[in-house]
Image (cartoon, helix red, strand yellow):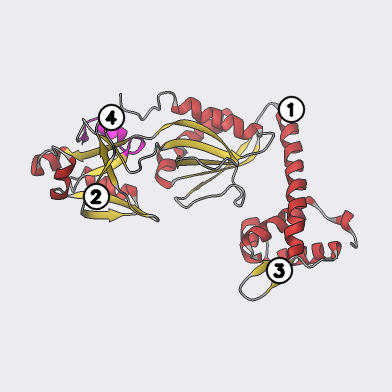
Amino acid sequence: MNNINSISIKTLVFFINVFNHQSFSVVARREGVSASKVSRIIKQLEDNLGQQLFYRNTRAVIPTEAARVFLTYAQSITASINEAQNKFQDKTLEPGGLVRINGPVFFGQRHIAPWLPQLSSRHPKLQIDLTLTDDFIDPHHDATDIIFRIGTLTDSSFHARTFGEQTYHLAASRAYIKKYGIVQSPSDLPEHKCLIYKGSSGQNRWLFKKENEDWVHQSIPALLTSNNAESLLVSALKGMGIVLFPDWLIGEYLKNGTLIKLLPNYNTAIKKTPQHVTAIYPNTRHVSLNVRQIIDYFSEVYGSPLYWELN
């Protein structure tokens, strides 16, 4: 090795990001620098280590076996530095600096973004980077401190704080019910006009069950499908059809009577396993003050029961 003492923490961060994304240009965009600068940093690192870390071609940057070995050490070093910084930050007893938050698009618009001004007033030294996407985000590969996720948590490599369980409701507007009549049972739905969310994994399944019975999937032809929940909600509010949506999305409309709950004697869902509203963050030994304070804040805001739940 030529000059390993000259390797900086920032260089290790660039290396880890290039390893994960296998692209100089992607890392350059994320870091706000040129692709040529990223390439120069990696070349200098290779010279310092005396090892080729990546094969370059016009389509990809491919890690070598040396890169895979070095990755473990680079991650360990950067994790230790981050842990030390978090401990020093905690000594100030005041959150500050950049915190990156990710969440689903419509949930974030409804239940994250509106509460950020109050969070900022409480902790004015925080800089908040909010990204809303319905794509799967892996905090080990993407630069994210807190991810709000709705679903079933199965990955033990994350820490998690569960705020509550998501509950689905079948609903339609008064205008729709007046025109097309009430739904008496799930088997009536094929004769009604249904508006169904369609995500990357396909069209939502509509499931129904009575107490102490098994879930039953009701096959339903859709009048309208969309990957945008707001479009379906607006259509339902205007009387176009029936929706099956979570309480955090339509709870306020059910409470004020704009939408009417259908089949109240049935439980409804899109999956048989319970779905939870959860904040997840990387599984580190020392959780940063920023992460702890922000999750505590949203736990306080959402309350128990969750403020959007129906009584």
In primary-sequence order, the first of circles 3 and 1 is: 3
Per the model, the C-alpha gap separating discs 1 and 2 is 52 Å
| Residue 212 numbered mark, or none | 4
Residue for badge 3:
36
The verdict on residue 228 being magenta is no
Q: For mark 2, what is the residue?
A: 195
Type of amino acid at the residue the image marks with label 4: Asn
Q: Residue at x 23, y 33 (%)?
A: 266
| Secondary structure state at the residue bearing disc 3 | helix
Numbered disc 1: secondary structure:
helix
Q: Quadrant of residue 214?
A: top left
Q: CA distance from mark 2 to mark 4?
A: 28 Å
Q: Residues within 10 Å of mark 2 (few under 14, many from 20)?
A: many
Mark 3: give few (<14), some (14-19) or many (20+) Cα within 10 Å. few
Asked if the residues shown at circle 3 and circle 1 are in contact, with their CB atoms under 8 angstroms apart, the answer is: no
Left or right of 191 in this view: 3? right
Nearer-N-terminus badge (3/2)? 3
Residue found 16% across the figure and 44% down from its top: 187
Foreground pick, 276 / 211:
211
Labels 2 and 4: the sequence-earlier one: 2
Look at discs 4 and 3 and give the one toward the viewer. Answer: 4
Say the numbered circle drawn on residue 28. Answer: none
Q: Is residue 137 above or below residue 265?
A: below
User: In the rendered structure, which amino acid carries the disc numbered 1?
Assistant: Lys
Q: Position of residue 80 (x, y in %)?
A: 76, 41
According to the picture, the residue beneath numbered tag 1 turns out to be 91
Pointers 2 and 4 in contact (CB under 8 A)? Answer: no
- Give the distance between the C-alpha atoms of the residues marked 3 and 2, in whole angstroms: 49 Å
Mark 4 lies on a secondary structure that is loop
The answer for how far apart the CA atoms under marks 4 and 3 are is 63 Å
Corner quadrant of residue 233: top left
